Image: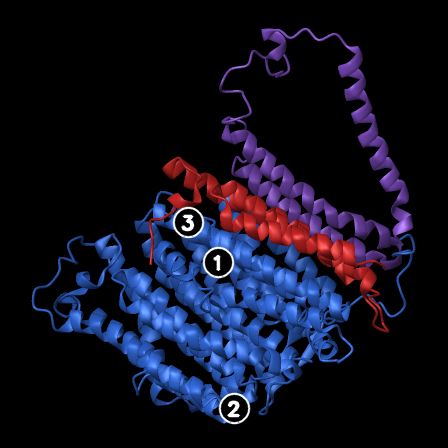
Amino acid sequence: MLAEYLPLLLLFAIAVGFVGVSLIVAARLGPWKPGPVKAMAYESGIITSPETEIAGSRFPVKFYLVAMLFIIFDVEAVFLYPWAVVLRDLGWFAVAAMAIFILLLFESYYYVLRKGGLEWD
Amino acid sequence: MQAVFPLTFAALLFSAGVYGVLSRRNAVLVLMSVELMLAAVTVNLVAFHGLVTTDVGDPLLSGQAFALFVMAVGAAEVGVGLAIVLLLYRNRATVNVDDADLMKY
Amino acid sequence: MSALAQQLPAGVEIPEIPWAAISPELTLFGAGILVLLLDTAGPRRRTSSVIALAILLGIAALAAIPGGAAPEIVALLVGAGVLQLALTLWLHTRPRLLGAVLTVVALVATIGIAAWQYQAAANGGMVGTESLLADMVAVDGVALFTRFVVAGAGILTVLLGFAYLQDRRIHRGEYYPLLLFTATGMTLLASAADLLMVFLAVEILSLALYVMTGLARRDMASQEGAFKYLLLGAFSSAFLLYGIALVYGATGTTHIATAGVALSDPGTPAGLVFAGIALMLVGFAFKVALVPFHMWTPDVYQGAPTPVTAFMAAATKVAAFAAFLRVFTGGMEQLAWIWVPAVSVLAAITMLVGAALAVVQDDLKRMLGYSAVAHAGYAAIGLVAVSEIGTGATLFYLLAYAIMSLGAFGILTILERRQRKAIAVADLRGLWQSAPSLAVMFALFLLSLAGIPGTVGFIAKFGIVRAAVDAGLVWLAVVLVISSVIAAYFYIRVIVAMFMDDEPAHLADAPVPPASAASTAVSVAAVGVIALGVLPPAVIDLAERAATFAG
């Protein structure tokens, strides 16, 4: 039973090993010249300011709202996977059931849309 | 089947969640601890599938189906939870659980 | 794992959908969706979308006829289509009123269907039991009785809340859909025959209730109540779930009755059995608010908008107790030796602590919150009696408590509209002079909560005592009496303030338009308290015949 997970373990070991080896090799072989610009946190090229720093940061609420809505709708999709596996065996019954489920999802999506939940400003 | 490993892991995860709920001050972290508890239950449900030894077994895979429902409901719960925390924050500019002390005893 | 789900395993069939049996839930849920959609649309779009929906329902009805559906279903579909069309066309410029009316219609329909189902299933004797939807849903006495109480409480809540919410500017369009979704969750919870359904129903009702508690977005107490409710609710759900997972691990099933039988098999690992039962017990104790798992109750009751509090006290308690009854009394009867002592002790502590803490409260909503805790203890006695008498007594007690608490919180709703702030005991001084009818009705509800003869509260408590003595739990009956004596003190303190005090408080300063709907609701509750207190046999009989669980 557990033997089935051996490839997974192997993959995990390779991943950890790769990261570890890269770090060690880079530290040993690479030149080490620290400077104030290099020490700055990397923020995709944006000049860092206290506002954008991760620690103690304040993200605008709009990001959070959209993220939350995304998570909720995203997780609902989890029911599609087992459904897809047994769809052939269950036939039209399963299609109708999932249609109702999706319809209800769309209904809540419509509600979010109408209430302005997806507007950025 | 060594169900002991996942079950122990789940028990530890659940305990960590309970500890987090009881000890954390930050409301968001408390919510995350509740999620840890739910995750522990998910691990349990999936692990127990291999343990089931009754004659019928579990042809409906109800444990694994249950795990999916736990995940979906957990997401909804966090959605509502964060919304409420956000409202609380807007009203009082803090997410510290101990500051929610308008009503006592 | 690779062999999983390659094909449909033997013995698995596509379940027949029992449309008629689950029509109350479908009605409530469908109405919730409809009201939500109508609320988001403008007046013109409202009309056109509702016409489209009526056509859809008509098509469904036409499709159901050759499908061999019962004529009742077709009639229900057509009726629903015509009714919602007519109501929307009539009220399409007043969305809140439309929402309220549609909600009441759906709840009345639910009561009607439940009454019809009760009649058909009982047929003069005990209510028959049926297990449907691949054993997910049970239609039995407990489920049908709960449907009555929940839908009735919902109707009174809508009547109570309309003017109050308007005044506080929290009459949001989401209120009625949330109420309907909560009611759906409650009726589902009462008819859940599978632990999966129990979990889902608990979450449906809780998620909607969290939001309803925090409805007053500017009111800090409301936010705080919602927050505490959410945290402790999610916390307790996790315990309940862990217990369910352990029970599943021990038995390989989540079906309540099957799991109960398998759990009492000596071959089942004892550790899993004990831990599973204990954790589920903690989860349910949180939900029905047994001490020491009651901490959220006073805060949530105090913080929530008062009509929501009324609904919560009346309906949530019934639904949670129905599931508690089904899982413990119904499912784990053979394991009573494990959980009965635990629940008995919890009930005893709950009765005493709830009553004792209520004595020191000054805020009336909070006081009634603690009294709700004590009442949960009384109702739990019928549970530990593990008998038909006990189950019937608990069901009747919950009905009685629903009426009394709706009445008491209803009076507070009316008073709060006039005072526009939380009501303390001192604010009621001299209410007898300024509003005699309110004072008399409030006194009636408080006397009933205290359990004075002539009111439904007495009859209900009497039934509980009878069940306790019958089951040999005399000590619990004694604790109940002690707790009632403590509780009488604070109920009577309020009554004394209303009738005896000479210097009246300035309560009626803010003149508000009268809310005839709220007065009607409170009057209905008052009539119920007296009618069931004087002539209870018919309804007690209904409750006792409802003490059946689908196995």
Instruction: Specify few, some or many for label 3: CA neighbours under 10 Å numbering under 14, 14-19, or 20 or more.
Output: many
Task: Kindly report the distance in space between the C-alpha atoms of the residues bearing marks 1 and 3.
Answer: 12 Å
Earlier in the chain: of badge 2 and badge 3, it is 3
Q: Quadrant of residue B79?
A: top right
Q: Position of residue C219 (x, y in %)?
A: 34, 46
Please tell me if label 1 and label 3 are on a single chain: yes
Q: Secondary structure at mark 2?
A: loop
Left or right of residue A33, residue C498 in this image: left
Q: Which residue is mark 3?
A: C215
Disc 1 marks which amino acid?
Leu
**Which disc, if any, is residue C471?**
2
Q: Position of residue C95 (x, y in %)?
A: 44, 49
Q: Which chain is blue?
A: C
Q: Colour of chain A?
A: purple
**Which disc, if any, is residue C412?**
none
Q: Which chain is red?
A: B
